[in-house]
Amino acid sequence: MAKDLVCGMDVDEKTAQHKSEYEGNTYYFCCPGCKSKFDKEPEKYISGAGEHSGHHHH
């Protein structure tokens, strides 16, 4: 399973209809809205500063 970095949902890579490639990695999303948010600001979500994460991972 992959995690939708925008909303935090688990997404199955095999059935995911929404995905983006960024810097050689593929990211999966549950809906087009999450994908478009990611496409606008990929760094924000990859660094873990998404809307739903209140803590940082070191």
Image (spheres, rainbow, N blue to C red):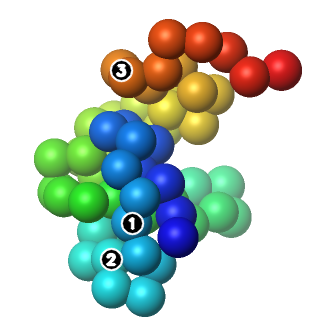
Residue at disc 2, secondary structure = loop
The residue beneath circle 3 is 51
Find the residue positioned furthest to the bottom.
14
Q: Work out how far the residue at label 2 is from the one at label 3, CA to CA, in angstroms.
A: 21 Å
Residue type, mark 3 in image = Glu
Residue 26's image quarter?
A: bottom right
Q: Residue 16 carries which label?
A: 2
x, y percent for residue 4: 41, 51
Instruction: Please tell me whether residue 21 is drawn above or below residue 52 in the rendered image.
Output: below
Identify which residue is drawn at 18% across, 58% down.
31
9 or 45: nearer the viewer? 9
Identify which residue is drawn at 26% across, 60% down.
30
Residue at disc 1, secondary structure = strand
Residue type, mark 2 in image = Ala
x, y percent for residue 40: 33, 36
Q: Could you classify mark 2 by the number of other residues whose Cα lies within 10 Å: few (under 14), some (14-19), or many (20 or more)?
A: some
Q: Which of marks 2 and 1 is in front?
A: 1
The count of marks equals 3
Left or right: 11, with 53 as reference point: left
x, y percent for residue 42: 48, 38
Residue type, mark 1 in image = Val
Disc with the residue nearer the chain's start (2 vs 1): 1
Instruction: Please tell me whether residue 55 is drawn above or below residue 28 in the rendered image.
Output: above
Instruction: Please tell me whether residue 46 is drawn above or below residue 28 in the rendered image.
Output: above
Image quadrant where one finds the C terminus: top right
x, y percent for residue 3: 48, 54
Disc with the residue nearer the chain's start (2 vs 3): 2
**Cβ–Cβ under 8 Å for marks 2 and 1:** yes
Q: Work out how far the residue at label 1 is from the one at label 3, CA to CA, in angstroms.
A: 17 Å
Q: Which mark is residue 11?
A: 1
Left or right: 4, with 45 as reference point: left
Residue 28's image quarter?
A: bottom left
